[in-house]
Amino acid sequence: MEEFWLDAMQILASTLRLATPLILCAMAGMFSERAGVVDIGLEGKMLMGAFAAAAAATITGSAWIGLLAAMFAGLSLALVHGFATITHRGDQIVSGVAINILASGLTVVLGIALFSQGGQSPPLSQSERFAPIDLPFAQTLAGVPFFGPFYETALSGHNILVYVAILAVPLSAFVLFATAFGLRLRAVGEAPEAVDSAGYSVAFLRYRAVIIAGLLCGIAGAYLSTAHGGGFVREMSAGKGYIALAALIFGKWRPVPTLFACLLFGALESSAARLSNVSFPLVGEIPVDVILIAPYVLTVILLAGFFGRAIPPRALSVPYVKDR
Amino acid sequence: MSRTALPRWVDLGLIPVLNLMMALVVAGIVVAIIGENPWRALRVMIDGAFVYPGSLGYTLYYTTNFVFTGLAVAVAFQARLFNIGGEGQAALGGLGAALVCLALDSVLPGLIVIPLAIMGAALFGAAWAFLPGFLQATRGSHVVITTIMFNFIGAGLLVALLTGPLIRPGQSTPQTRDFAEGATLPQIHEIARALGIDMASSPLNLSIVVAVFACIFVWVLIWRTPYGYRLRTLGESEPAARYAGVAVPKMIIVTMCISGALAGLMAINDVLGAQEKLILNFTAGYGFTGIAVALMGRSHPVGIVLASLLFGALYQGGAELSFEFNTIDREMVLVIQGLIILFSGALAYMLEAPLSRVFARQPRTA
Amino acid sequence: MSQAVELSKICKTFGAVRANDAVDLSVEEGTVHGIIGENGAGKSTLVSILSGHYRADSGSIALFGRPVKMASSADAIANGIGMVHQHFMLVPNFTVIENLMLQLAKAPLLKASRADVRVKLKALQDAYGLAVDPDAVVQDLAVGLQQRVEIIKALIGGGRILILDEPTGVLTPDETDQMFESIKVLKRQGVTIILITHKLREIMAITDNVSVMRRGKIVAHRKTDETSREELAELMVGRTVAHVRNEAQTEGGDVRLEARGISLRDAAGVNRLSDISLALHAGEIVGVAGVAGNGQSELLAVLSGMCAPDAGTIRVGNHVVDPQSPADPRTMRQLGVAHVPEDRRREGLVLPFQMSENAVLGYLRHARGKRRWLLGRKRMIERCAALMGEFDVRPPDPHLAAVGFSGGNQQKLVLAREHGANPKVLLVGQPTRGVDIGAIEFIHRQLLELRNKGCAILLVSVELDEILALSDRVIAMNAGRIVGEVSGSDADRQTVGLMMAGVSGSLPAGTERLAS
């Protein structure tokens, strides 16, 4: 029993680590989409952030400067998205596609120009990465039945960005639902004309939402290259941005359900390797690839309305034009 | 008003050229920041795409891919559907073609297997687009998201098949066995040599002829048939389509299937024409390039051919960059592609206002 | 008395359209000031400038004698101007209090503002009698209450000037009365009210002064009790309208279309049509009168096949349509039921298409070429040119996109197209909405001519005068039901108006006909 529990806690720990970029990106998407701006560019912003973090950390030797660089990179692409879709009312999906492709290309081109290693960054040293943090009393409490392993194995020993991601959820919920800014931000995604007639700028609100999304994606990127991984590898976001988008839809654009969707998808990924050789009743062995595509399949099923309707914000993807 | 009062040559000629130039200028700036000469890079790309022996064949080979994926996106665009799933539909198309070849290439003559394989590609591509179309038409889930998801599902499916049941026996590379000699599309240089013309080797193959027919097919379909009329009506105004009695759900499903079939056909260029087997990730992002091609080509077959040529040249010329420079990679092409999508798609309205001030027609007297 | 609002030389153009042309307007404090004019006369643009929604190209604004800059909605709110738009500016899935906080919350945290807004809401309720549940979700409220929320929103920030833009268009007669009561209370409390409307009745009922707008200009100012409906009507349209009238009303021939017990529920499960039965006879025009939103649009949608009824049957000739075998618009057209839709810009035409393409919308059989699976371009162009000639569509060029034509010419093409199908039944919705006067007469004449040729016509219009002028029979709709019917010769504004309001109703003629 105890061994099983310890095992479960290890899975939980790896789930948390794999879910971290999903949570950060999904929260990013929540700000953007709650304000009415579709964000399929999560992937690209995260990838750009990952590259910027690794590059800046390599050059300056500081993981923290890497993090700042990543946030700046995410912000820059977010501003491009804002400029195209808010200022010029361009198609939000087209803009997102452009950003993803741009990031794919730029990270490799700049990577080769900087490091001449086929698009990778040099491996990062300890100081250039975010190290695991032991929570207080982790060792002391380890012996306590059930809670001990939960605290010591599952919760403690992650790098700081994992905790940032976990904190990002209540913080996002607070901003969106308990502040005047959040109220107006949500209103702008539902009925922008109401916000406009109340005397607040729709464009400025949407820009702020998109900027927050960019910063959060940047953090997610920094996590990939300087916390979870030890350097930048080309295409290292590997579709995680899209999984985060799926999680956001799966969570029906609400913070806590979205968190659980991210954890579910993280758990699927972390268990994929373990489950690959396990024989299930009726179906037998399930190939790893099938487990890995489960988030996408689940999202399609959800979108088709087979378990509850996911109703997006009313003004999502609609550029705001004053009538006439 | 959605339509501008710009003259046609500005709308269809000048704006795409300006968009391309803006994308090239920004890309040039990136090259300059890297510390290389943008003019030299451009020169290398043009030489690489058109001048070196065999380069034109490669350029046209890539062009063929983009014609298919560009048409796929364009057909859906005409009905105001955004099919981002070209990548997955092409992958499945490859599977369809490969399954036909693997099953029949030892029993039937090539002349029968090849058309069947082409149909297999179209059919599998269509099938992979059917479900997103069906779900949008009947359950209201948006094709954008479902086709993105289907790209990943398709990729996963192909990995599972190519590492499992379809893998070439006794090998660990995830690919099928080679198809039988006669069950593949002949390459153009082979035909030329058979006719006694000397031509440098390239993967360019008879798929390009299929691509030409696809262009004509799409043009007739969209602009000359009742189906195309209904499709364009739906694209411009759904209420008008309902008023006119267009069966909107059926229209969405059929259109997605046609779009998917075109994307699926992209696979024949690689699977039947170049590799002569099914390999992993052969779609290499061409499905996404189709978005850029359709946007630049204004969703019209003529525009798509021109835009495909441009992207064909970019891809082939871009490959040359890696040989000539230590610091520039072919991924530079992705940067240009992203910028083109940005300028001609997302920022499509940016040029309209200033240009309409310059070129505005005589204002109507009120 | 001092002037609450003084506008001088306000100009605003949209593209080539001069929406406001050197408009001067002054509104006395504490009065109800009406602005009346036809659709598109520039009324909404003018008040949108006053409320900061648009910026004027030139001109100046003064409030209570002080010149002000009106650059945004925020400026207007700060200057005590509140506007209730024709289309509500509310977030439907927010509560009333959340909607109010959109504007009022100044502190970063909502908690602080929430209590404050409740207090203000209570105060407003006490002062003006505007009661509403603060925690109700807006989309669950009746339209009249939603409008009340809008009025509260306009006043709660300390607004002293209230602008109402076509406030009764969406209201039932009962709700309209309540709204007018509210206006009277507000006026007593010293609030200045500007009422935009195109309904003369409202101007006469509630305003102190009235300004008439026509084609972007103010053409007259009057004291309400020194003017008359007739004078205002003439000022609005600029000349006495030579109405086309249906002089020889007919009894009608055989039944062309018969509907029995039609009911329709919307997605929310609300009954939009309840037990509608009617018969259309050859050679008669049946007018459907009613306040917008009382089921007329849904009736057209069901009869034209655009929408399947939940109950009831429609019989056209030998063909029966019921919920088990619903018809689509294509089938209905094949049966000879043509349809001029209410919204010509969204439904009746595809604006970016050339006129030749629009001329076959819904009638692709008129566009088949020599090879049946191809469109015959030449045939389409010839057909369009013929229709344009017949109905005097200008400019008569089939190659031009529909978007470039005026409302009247667009409508003529739609009518020509439906007329050209030689229909047995013609369903017509708002045939003259946004159409210039010359075209109105032409369209009315064509409808009468079609009737004389034996077509059965169902005419839906919010313009009661249009209904009265053209109909052989008038039926009135209220809340999705037919609430009364009179013959054209007996129909006048008062009887039909009362029926529309659901106050009186009689169904002798209708029941008789159905029974036979």
Image (cartoon, rainbow, N blue to C red):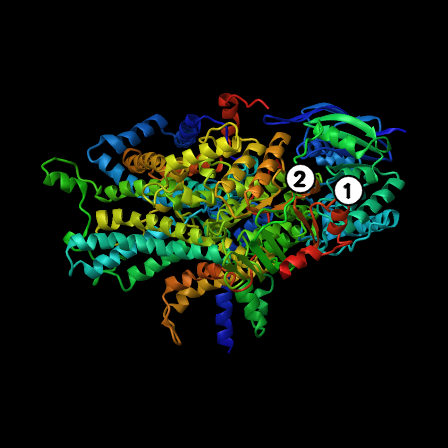
Q: Quadrant of the C terminus of chain C?
A: bottom right
Chain letter of the residue carrying label 2: C
Would residue B308 be seen by someone viewing this image from the given angle?
yes
Give how far across and how far down residue B284 sits, in percent: 33, 47
Discs 2/1, front: 2
Kindly report the distance in space between the C-alpha atoms of the residues bearing marks 2 and 1. 48 Å
**Element class at badge 2:** loop
Please identify the quarter of the rendering in which residue A143 is found.
bottom right
Chain letter of the residue carrying label 1: C
Q: Would residue C130 be found to the left or right of residue B183 on screen?
A: right
Give how far across and how far down residue A296 sits, in percent: 45, 58
Residue B183 or C59: which is nearer the viewer? Answer: C59
Q: Amino acid at mark 2?
A: Glu
Q: Would residue B15 be found to the left or right of residue C242 on screen?
A: left
Residue in the picture at 29% in, 30% down: B46
Q: Amino acid at mark 1?
A: Ala
Residue in the picture at 20% in, 36% down: B54
Residue neighbourhood size for the residue with mark 2, other residues' Cα within 10 Å, grouped as few (<14), some (14–19), many (≥20): few
Residue C508 or A3: which is nearer the viewer? Answer: C508
Q: To which residue does mark 1 refer?
A: C154
Is B359 placed above or below C344 here? above
Task: Tell me the number on the disc at residue C247.
Answer: 2
Residue neighbourhood size for the residue with mark 1, other residues' Cα within 10 Å, grouped as few (<14), some (14–19), many (≥20): many
Q: Would residue C191 be found to the left or right of residue C83 on screen?
A: right
**Element class at badge 1:** helix
Residue A259 or A157: which is nearer the viewer? Answer: A259
Would residue A109 be seen by someone viewing this image from the given angle?
no
Is A193 placed above or below C404 here? below
Please identify the quarter of the rendering in which residue C260 is found.
bottom right
Q: Would residue B6 be found to the left or right of residue C311 on screen?
A: left
Q: If you read the primary sequence from the N terminus, does the residue marked by circle 2 or circle 1 appear first?
A: 1
Instruction: Let me know if marks 2 and 1 both belong to one chain.
Output: yes
